[in-house]
Amino acid sequence: MTGGRPVISTLGCRLNAFESEAMGEMADAAGLHDAVIVNTCAVTSEAVRKSQKEIRRLARENPGARVIATGCGVQTETQRFADMDGVDLVIGNAEKMLPETWARVVADDGPRVIVDDIMSVTETANHLIDGFGRHRAYVQVQNGCDHRCTFCIIPYGRGNSRSVPAGAVVEQIKRLCDRDCNEVVLTGVDLTSWGADLPGAPRLGNLVRRILKLVPDLPRLRLSSIDSIEADPDLLEAIATEARFMPHLHLSLQSGDDMILKRMKRRHLRDDAIRFCHEVRALRPDMVFGADIIAGFPTETEEMFENSLKLVDECDLTWLHVFPYSPRPGTPAARMPQVDGRTVRARAARLRAAGACAVTRHLDAQIGTTRKVLTEAPTMGRTEQFAVVRLSSPQPEGALIRAKVSGHDSRELAGDPVNRVQEADRRTSGGDRTKERGDRSMARIAFAERET
């Protein structure tokens, strides 16, 4: 590459992807050329190895380019990346989000390792961009985590929890709507902790309802992964009454066994997860759940694993993210008695098989229905419940359309476009959003009473 824009490779989560977009803007503004930037992941030891492999690959494919490593892998294992042959610069998670860092990189003015103490960071990144994604925008509203789950290294890569003020989030989403964005996904490391560090300690539900009230032209709002035990009454109110809040929640469950949850230092038990799913379904019958579940956590017996497996049916989960446990150096779980690797992989396979059956059941139920679909490509989009739809004829990218579901292949729906969603339908009126509140409101009140 000669004189070209930086090549940016992202590993890991949506938040990393959001930040890669921001880094690309800052690097372009600073005039950085002939560079490779790898935004690494540290969620597992395998993720770190993949990050290093990606750095080596891009270095080979881009001879002469400056190679820059950043992200959670760099933050948690700085020296490991600094010692890699061919790596010119290593930049920490806080520093990568500062325009002055990229100006220093261009000027070649500074140390080779730019990584400070992430725990000393008290503010969110001050470089807010207009979302990542053209028609479905991922908007960072929170970073870091105050919890210390025994399997997780991420707090040491991201620092403590810190929130973007609601006013800044609302203004950002208004800008996205001005650019014809049809869906926004709120994202963060520990999304349901949003607001705890802000004046008055607002909760995530307050932010959601404020967005929906102050940005009436936003057709669809989603959340990324949430911790169900932290769901607040305002969030439940939005689920029950706001048609523009999408009926899809991805839950950080991790296990279905109480002893394993305690050893993980999670803040919920299996009955909490089951009760939350049942109560949300009472508020929103069309709600679909995804979940993160770890297979083979240290000390997990077959009986404990069966409790996780049963959770798929007991919570009526659909979209599973299954993680075979692997020890992460520096975490308490890595020092616990480990489960044999073959057993871990076999349990993960059984969970994935249960997840595949759950997906098939969900897709079966869609046949013959007409769904609102946001197109991500001319012949592909997603329903409100986040199922992929393959369309029989090309449609404008980023459009909201109706499609009649004709079948599926056990992974994706097949749909025939019917018509574009009418403007009045897309901008759902306040009156429409208050329909069918009777039973939902009673369930919400019961939830609020239990919370207090």
Image (cartoon, helix red, strand yellow):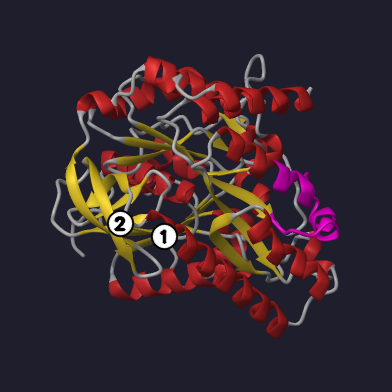
Placement of 62 over or under 262, stated as above or below: below
Q: Provide residue 330's location: percent of width, then percent of height.
A: 75, 61
Residue 363 is marked as 1
Q: Provide residue 277's location: percent of width, then percent of height.
A: 64, 44
Q: Which residues are magenta?
A: 254-275
Residue 172 in which image quadrant: top left
Placement of 107 over or under 365, stated as above or below: above
The residue at 30%/56% (across/down) is 389
Q: Nearer the viewer, residue 400 or 435?
A: 435
Placement of 78 over or under 423, stated as above or below: below
Upstream in sequence: badge 1 or badge 2: 1
Q: Is residue 6 magenta?
A: no
Q: Residues within 10 Å of mark 1 (few under 14, many from 20)?
A: many
Looking at numbered disc 1 in the image, what kind of residue is underneath it? Leu
Q: Is residue 168 visible?
A: no
Report the residue marked by disc 2.
389
The residue at 68%/41% (across/down) is 276
Looking at numbered disc 2 in the image, what kind of residue is underneath it? Val
Q: What whole-number distance in Å separates the C-alpha atoms at marks 1 and 2? A: 10 Å
Q: Is residue 271 magenta?
A: yes
